Image (tube, rainbow, N blue to C red):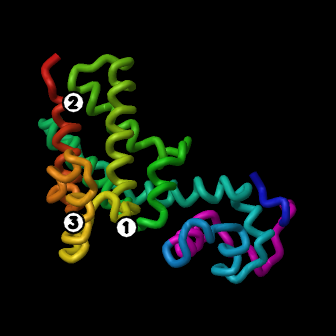
Amino acid sequence: MTDPAIPPRRGRPPKHETQLSRAAIQSAALTVIDTEGIAALGMRSVGRVLGVDAKSLYHHVDGKDDLLDAVAEYILGQLRIPPQTDSIEADLRALAHEFRRVTHAHPEAATLVLTRQLSSTAGLAPTNAILALLRRSGRDPGESVHLLRTLLATLIGTLLREVSAGPTFGTADIEGIAERRRTLEESGLPQLAAAASELARFDRDREFEYTLDLMVRMVTRPE
């Protein structure tokens, strides 16, 4: 969907804008997100980074939605599908950690990487890798798709929590842990009070590995 305030401009771009490319726009868009947050991303903000009129971007992207997809594709293009081994468990762990790596590289863009539905090769390659792994585990295509969606929902939820979780999920800060624990213990809710020491603490690495262990068990459980 295009920005109604900036009508698309077609035809041959002016000479001073001929150096523009989709890759340059992707990089500039990621710069905007990394420095100003995803809410600041738009044709004008990207044009400002590139030093060009925002209208010139329409020679390479169709509008805001295409720009968002372009950023997600750019980041997923950095994802290196791990080489296949003889171990399904090892391959799943390696793939999950690679998802985590590209997510943490640009945390402000995590929602794009993890939630945009893409049709490019870069966007589809990770899904293809997971399906290949599930088929190796003996699942038929139908069950593989169901399990794929469960795994992705679990992984996406975990990674989004990592990059955006507030104090509700706990903290790694010593003073914050103590304050949160007191709040939970004094809540008057018995189960929260009993689990206060764990609920107050949030170790991202520990939580990710726990989630990954669950995913591995789902995939490798006997039929």
The three-letter code of the residue at mark 2 reads: Val
In the displayed structure, 222 sits above or below 116; it is above
Residue 180 in percent (x, y) is at 25, 66
Alpha-carbon distance for marks 1 and 3? 34 Å
Percent of width and height locating residue 222: 13, 20
Q: Which amino acid type is marked by label 3?
A: Arg
- On the rendered image, what quadrant is the C terminus found in? top left
Q: Which mark is residue 182?
A: 3
Region in magenta? 6-33
Q: Which residue is mark 2?
A: 219
- The mark closer to the camera, 1 or 3, is 3
Other-residue count near label 1 (Cα within 10 Å), few / some / many at <14 / 14–19 / ≥20: few
- Residue 27 seen by the camera: no
The residue positioned 39% from the left and 36% from the top of the image is: 128
Q: Earlier in the sequence, mark 1 or mark 3?
A: 1
Q: Residue at x 36, y 55 (%)?
A: 161
Residue corresponding to mark 1: 105
Figure check: 1 above or below 174: above
Mark before the other along the chain sequence, 2 or 3: 3
Mark 2 vs mark 3, CA separation in Å: 39 Å
Answer whether labels 2 and 3 touch (C-beta < 8 Å): no
**Seen from this angle, which residue lies furthest front?**
188
Tell me if residue 116 is in the magenta stretch.
no
Amino acid marked by disc 1? Ala
Q: Position of residue 136 (x, y in %)?
A: 23, 27
